[in-house]
Amino acid sequence: MNDTPNDPRNGRSPTPIAQSDTRTYRFSVIWLVPLVALLIAGYLGWRGLTTRGPVITITFDTADGLTSGQTEVKSKSVSLGTVESIRLSDDLHHVEVGVRMTSAASRMMTSNARFWVVRPRINGASITGLETVMSGAYIAMDPGEPGGRHTTFFKGLESPPGVRSDQPGHTYTLMTPTLGSIGQGAPIFFRDVVAGEVLGYTLPPGGRGPIKVQIFVHAPYDQYLRTDTRFWNVSGVQVGLGAGGLKVKLQSLQALLSGGIAFAPPDARDEHLVQASSDSVFRLYDSQEEADAAGYRERIPLVTYLTSPVAGLTKGGRMTMFGIQVGMIDDVKLLVDPHTGQARVRVAMELQPERVLNDQEVPADALRSLLHMQVANGLRASVQSASFLTGESEIALTFVKNARAATMTQEGDALVLPGQAGGMAGIMDSVSTITDKVAAMPLTQVGENLNNLLAHADARINSADMRQGLSSLRASMENLQVISHDARAQMPQLLAGLDTTLKNANSLLSSYGGDTDFQRNLQQMVVQLNEAARSLRFLSDFLTRHPSALITGR
């Protein structure tokens, strides 16, 4: 049995034998967690560096609603940055808000950009910013028009701007002596549709002169504005009590609370006018009636002088003809002549023939000639009451019957119409004229003469001569009755004798034949005797029916 070299029983040490390493290593899934975290951290770091924008500073009067690390900067609900810091300024007058903008907003950081804080606001009848009640306030941004210089310092707005840079439309300026209840954000109405809003207003230097109101009209309503478009105030409730009765006009609830302005569509005659350009200046009228009156191009200045009361006659009142308005009153002024002391009222008016006539009916150059003809036919200007309830008066152009001859004169550019008292003053003048005539009558002398006449008449009636005359009259009546009776009794005999005479005359004519002068005269006498007989018959019949005619007459 052979001993093996590695056998420990031979007393020899075992000889090492080389063997190959067959151990295998496996990849553990747990190593993916730090690897993924590393990749995510790297991506976030890379993205943070690539999307990191500039830090800008916005100043506000207050930091109400702003929170560092939470408040966002948005434009059209898209986040463009986050507030990083809020601190007071060195002068302690405002706050400085540091905002980290995104890289996408870097190109928007120009001098034309605007920032404001969106909070719940109540402006008149509109409420904005209600979405911030739950989500909190945020800073809104308007990039503005392109082309501004790059900057990182901005002054924030305390209220939202009226116009965004991406809103189509135009801005205009209105001039008005009084602002009324119109404020920023007040609506602009076109045919009861909100077509724009008021951006703000600017007081004149020194506080004198008209106020400039800036407005913005949205597209497509801005294309309806012409160079002579008229704007008027529709703020609040307009209540009027005049000749037409009680009038209450309310544009809308929004106009009632925050004021409003309206403008009318262009007239057919304004179609040839060009569209108003941006920043055009218009006048703001107090009412639609005043704006409509300003649209009449043909105006004839008139003046009249009155010596009767003009209570209730004011500037802006109506001038009417047959109750239809044909113009307006421009001025009412009291004039006193220092030499004679005579006082009278000068009323300046404007005749607006376009209210009732057109150019085809009466040409403009023929209106003055027409007025001259009407004055010659009795046209006069007088004061009439427009409303007994309010005491308002107006100038009425009326045709007076049997008016005194008058002519129309010229006073500068104005035509002077003859005036005449009208209304209650005219009635009182007529009554005064009648009383003056009555007062001029000698009523005292007439009464004395009448008393004397009655006294003498009473004495004459009671006199003896009057009694004797009445007795003689009674006797004469009785005699006349007897004569009448005798005349009726003798009338047949008279007629019978007349017939005999006629027969004899006819016999005589027959005996004297031939055409002689005697025969002709005799024939004429016979005709006259026939007429006399006929008259006597009529007299007899009449006396038979009316015997008293001998005394009283026929």
Image (cartoon, helix red, strand yellow):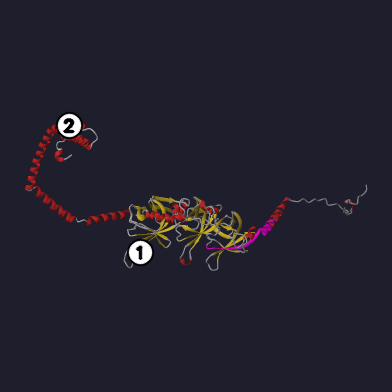
On screen, residue 506 above or below 166: above
Q: Is residue 518 left or right of residue 149?
A: left
Q: Is residue 259 visible?
A: no
Q: Nearer the viewer, residue 119 or 461?
A: 461
What kind of residue is marked 1?
Leu
Q: Position of residue 540 (x, y in %)?
A: 16, 34
The answer to if 210 sits in the magenta stretch is no
Q: Residue at 13%, 50% (x, y): give it.
A: 454
Residue where numbered disc 2 is placed: 504
Q: Measured from the top left, where is residue 67 in percent x and y?
A: 56, 59
The segment highlighted magenta reads 43-61
Question: Please, what is the three-letter code of the amino acid marked with disc 2?
Answer: Asn
Q: Nearer the viewer, mark 1 or mark 2?
A: 2
In this picture, residue 164 sits left or right of residue 262 = right
Looking at the image, residue 156 sits to the left or right of residue 539; the answer is: right
State the image coordinates of residue 495 (x, y, percent, origin top left).
Answer: 16, 32
Q: Quadrant of the C terminus?
A: top left
Q: How far separated are the C-alphas under marks 1 and 2?
A: 101 Å
Q: Secondary structure at mark 2?
A: helix
Query: Residue 406: which quarter of the image?
Result: bottom left
Look at the image and tell me whether residue 320 can be seen.
yes
Picture layout, residue 205 above or below residue 123: below
At a point 48% along the width and 51% down the height, the residue shown is 360
Residue nearest the viewer, comparing 136 with 368: 368
Q: Looking at the rendered structure, which numbered label has been put on residue 210?
A: none
Q: Which residue is mark 1?
A: 335
Q: What element does badge 1 sit on?
A: strand
Q: Earlier in the sequence, mark 1 or mark 2?
A: 1
- Which quarter of the figure has residue 68? bottom right
Residue 550 position by quadrant: top left
Q: Nearer the viewer, residue 50 or 70?
A: 50
